[in-house]
Amino acid sequence: MLRYRPHPVLARSALRLITSSNRRTSSFAIANSLKASNSRVPSSSGPSSLALTIHKTPNHSLQRFASTLEPVSLVDHKAEEKVANKKIEPHPEEVSVDSSVHQVLHEKGTNDEEEDIEMLAGVWSDIRIIKETFAFREVPREAYIMGLAGVLPYLGTSLSTVYLAWDINHDAITGSGFLVSGQTAELLLHIVEPLQIGYGAVIISFLGAIHWGLEWAKYGGATGYGRYAYGVVAPAVAWPTLMFPIEYALISQFLTFTFLYYADAQAVVKGWAPHWYSTYRFVLTFVVGASIVISLIGRGQIADKIARLPGPADRMRALRESQLESLEYEEREKRARRVAEEEAEMTSDEDEDE
């Protein structure tokens, strides 16, 4: 068995390398020192040379290549020298009360504008998406203009209701109306409200009739009774609202408009209507729904200050009561005539007997 004995020269070289205080100790330096010492030792065929050959470092070639590379400096000395020679110029206009508050956030002590821009970027992106959604680029121009014009009367009656309600309150507080008297405003309000309900019933019926036209044009194919049902249900629900009191009629029509929008959106999904029709209907339904809410708010402000306008149901009830009264009057007249005739006959018989 071969036994390794360290050579005295090799041992002293390694000890000097380890104890050196000015040189960084590394395996790479030790390997170079061992190599230099080995070159000074005369070769022999004894056990020591065999042991050194066996324990040679595997990455010796890589370390020798790394020793030939020059160190790379990451400091730009030219730029540093340029900054050092640059003269510092004073800027008194940038000094303010807040200039020394945010020194960590910004070089000049002001708020970082880039962060605000990044925060507003999401908001502007959402606004841009909304504009693109409701741009109506694919909606025919005629349908766009006529649709918006069609909701103007509904919006006008709502705004009129709010103004007349305010004028009635003004008359109740100050004793006189702003433009018209309180009685005149109440009379006009009783005219405007039925107009809004009637116009709403017309719009609902028209929205149902659109599906009949699409079915006749066979848009998306012939669907049969499914699409015809839209045109039947819409007026069947709309026109009975004319018999309701004002508040109940407005609420009923609001629910009907919402249901018809959902039905139209489903028709678009099924391919029964153009793909732009759901967005188009959403905008018109939003305007009509907002108008109904405005009317309800205005009506609620004067609920205890005006007499309720008789509705169609009240008129029918009054008509029925008047018919009953007329029948009773006719019966009383008939009975009175019969009594008079009987008394006349009795008087004539008495005269004959005498």
Image (cartoon, helix red, strand yellow):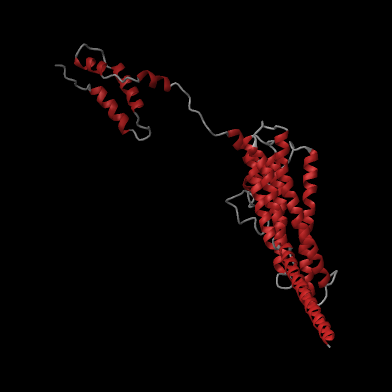
Residue 137: image quadrant is: top right
Q: Residue pushed farthest left?
A: 1
Q: Position of residue 59 (x, y in %)?
A: 35, 20
Q: Residue at x 65, y 55 (%)?
A: 99
Q: Where in the figure is residue 5, as x and y percent of width and height?
A: 19, 21
Q: Is residue 199 above or below residue 296?
A: above
In the picture shown, does residue 349 fall above or below 52? below
- Relative to residue 16, is residue 295 drawn left or right? right
Which residue sits furthest bottom?
Answer: 354
Q: Position of residue 40 (x, y in %)?
A: 30, 17
Looking at the rendered structure, the number of numbered marks drawn on it comes to: 0
Name which residue lies at 79% across and 52% down: 152
- The residue under the point 37% across, 32% down is 24
Q: What residue sits 66% from the left and 59% below the top?
A: 97
Specify the quadrant of the image occupied by residue 290: bottom right
Left or right of residue 98: residue 47: left
Query: Compared with residue 252, is residue 222 higher up or lower down, i.e. above or below?
Result: above
Residue situated in front as seen by the camera: 117 or 46: 117
Quadrant holding the N terminus: top left
Q: Is residue 288 left or right of residue 352?
A: left
Q: Where residue 202 appears, x then y in whole percent?
A: 75, 50
In front here: 53 or 206?
206
Relative to 11, 333 lies left or right: right
For residue 174, what is the image quadrant? bottom right
Using the image, determine if residue 101 lies above or below residue 334.
above
Q: Nearer the viewer, residue 74 or 130?
A: 130
- Toward the top, the furthest residue is 45
| Image quarter of the C terminus | bottom right
Let me know if residue 113 appears in the view.
no
